[in-house]
Amino acid sequence: MVITKDKALKSLAPNAEWNIPLDGVIRWNSEDITQPTDAEINAEIIRLQAVYDSQLYARTRKAKYDLLNQDEMRY
């Protein structure tokens, strides 16, 4: 999964209202909440991507665990 600008914005300003049209320019609609800078957004993308990547083993393990027959796990 690739972390996008919208996911970073949701993380940085969860209560803010904004949209990103096809031109890619953020339209900030929350006057009471400060818009994050491009540097802050890029840093958050890097941070969220690192968190996601660090959980690869857990996601893989859970997928394999879910395939097990539950009757087999009783023994």
Image (cartoon, rainbow, N blue to C red):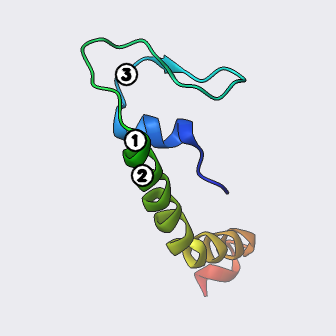
Residue beneath disc 1 = 11
The relative height of residue 28 versus residue 4 in the rendered view (above or below) is above
Res 73 quadrant in image = bottom right
Residue beneath disc 2 = 44
- x 37%, y 21%: residue: 16
Amino acid type shown at disc 2? Glu
Mark 1 vs mark 2: give the one in front: 2
Q: Are marks 1 and 2 in contact (CB under 8 Å)?
A: yes
- Please report whichever mark, 1 or 2, sits nearer to the chain's N-terminal start: 1
Q: Secondary structure at mark 2?
A: helix
> How far apart are the alpha carbons under marks 1 and 2?
8 Å
Q: Picture coordinates of residue 64 (x, y %)?
A: 71, 76
Quadrant housing the C terminus: bottom right
Q: Picture coordinates of residue 14 (x, y %)?
A: 37, 31
- x 27%, y 21%: residue: 33
Q: Is residue 47 left or right of residue 2?
A: left
- Please report whichever mark, 3 or 2, sits nearer to the chain's N-terminal start: 3
- x 69%, y 75%: residue: 71
Quadrant housing the N terminus: bottom right
Q: Is residue 27 left or right of residue 75?
A: left
From the viewer's side, name the closer residue of 31 and 13.
31
- x 46%, y 65%: residue: 51
Q: Picture coordinates of residue 60 (x, y %)?
A: 66, 74
Question: In the rendering, which numbered label is found on residue 16?
Answer: 3
